[in-house]
Amino acid sequence: MNVAAMHTTHTSRALRVSEKAASLDALQLHAAPQAEPAPPAGHAVVRVAAAAVNPSDVKATLGIMPQAVWPRTPGRDFAGTVVSGPAEWIGREVYGSGGDVGITRDGSHGRYLVLPEQALRAKPRGISMDEAGAVGVPFVTAYEGFRRSGMPQAGQTVLVLGANGKVGQAAVQLASQAGARVIAVQRHAGPYAGFANGPVDVIDARHHTDVAARVRELTDGRGAHIVYNTVGSAYFEAANKAMAKGATQIFIATHDRAVPFDIFAFYRGMHTFVGIDSLAMDCIASTAQLDAMRDGFERGTLKPFPVARHFTLDEAMDAYRLVLSGSTDRVVLRP
């Protein structure tokens, strides 16, 4: 592990990764000097105030994301102030995210971030820079899954598997905002009090080994209309058994790539499977989801994650290690 850093107070810096690493301990992560860039035509420069550390950010530094380029600055989510570019944007506070940011282009774990003008979105009123810099990947992913599933409706039941994760927590909020009944499956305590827009039935998978049976009990045998499976293979069988007739299941991740699949149950259930890859939505495409959620953030029906800890660039390795360890805290860098 090597974190090289400039310590001059007025020097702007950015994290840099130069090559794949076999483990976090072997990662060569440098905080290098960064001059304020001049934006190309049609682009803007954002001075980053806060940038979340997502699990995908850390995994991408280890070479797990095949499309990642080297060398680069990591970081997919951001909030900050536009300092150069189109005149109408200069001085405005913005936020955003993208599957290309920090993966195929330099990202937000630095003082400056260059973005296409079309990727600029004003930070929602009433939320802090730390909060705005930490909503991107989880909320964009959760929303896109629901968008491609027809969006939750009042009177429907939405089952969220892995609801203790950040995408799961965002899915709980979005479903309850829409008026759906929410059932959350998790293995740890969930932060639902004060966040969801209605009561949430929680199934503790440590004590309820037959999750599908419990879902059937809670729904008078009908099952869930939408299943948001944020875990994948570990809940695949239970999720299928918990689906109502005509239900949709959303996938964003998995541990095992191959799972037993009952084609008969699939077509007799008239089920739909939806796969979501947030890396496929670049910083421009992600603005559609952010636009759709703006009103919720400003009205308070969607609540950004509390930022439990923030780190400087000199402390970036501690932040990366914390996130990779599976911490449920939302971690933010302040470049």
Image: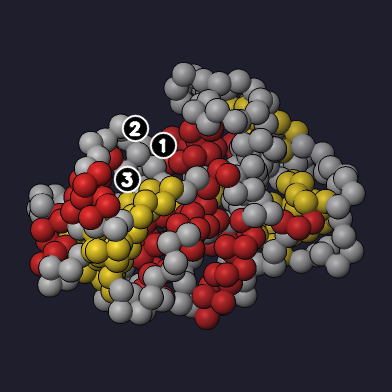
Q: Residue at x 69, y 37 (%)?
A: 105
The x and y percentages for residue 244 are: 23, 63
The amino acid type, in three-letter code, at marker 1 is Leu
Instruction: Compare residues 200 and 286 and report the one nearer the observer.
Output: 286
Left or right, 120 with respect to 182, comes to: right
Q: For residue 145, which quarter of the picture?
A: bottom left
The amino acid type, in three-letter code, at marker 3 is Val
Residue placed under numbered mark 2 in the picture = 257
Q: CA distance from mark 2 to mark 3?
A: 12 Å
| Dot 2 or dot 3, earlier in sequence | 3
Q: Are marks 2 and 3 in contact (CB under 8 Å)?
A: no
The amino acid type, in three-letter code, at marker 2 is Arg
The x and y percentages for residue 264 are: 21, 47
How many residues crowd around disc 1 within 10 Å: few (fewer than 14), some, or many (20 or more)? Answer: some
Residue placed under numbered mark 1 in the picture = 324
Residue 48 seen in the figure = yes
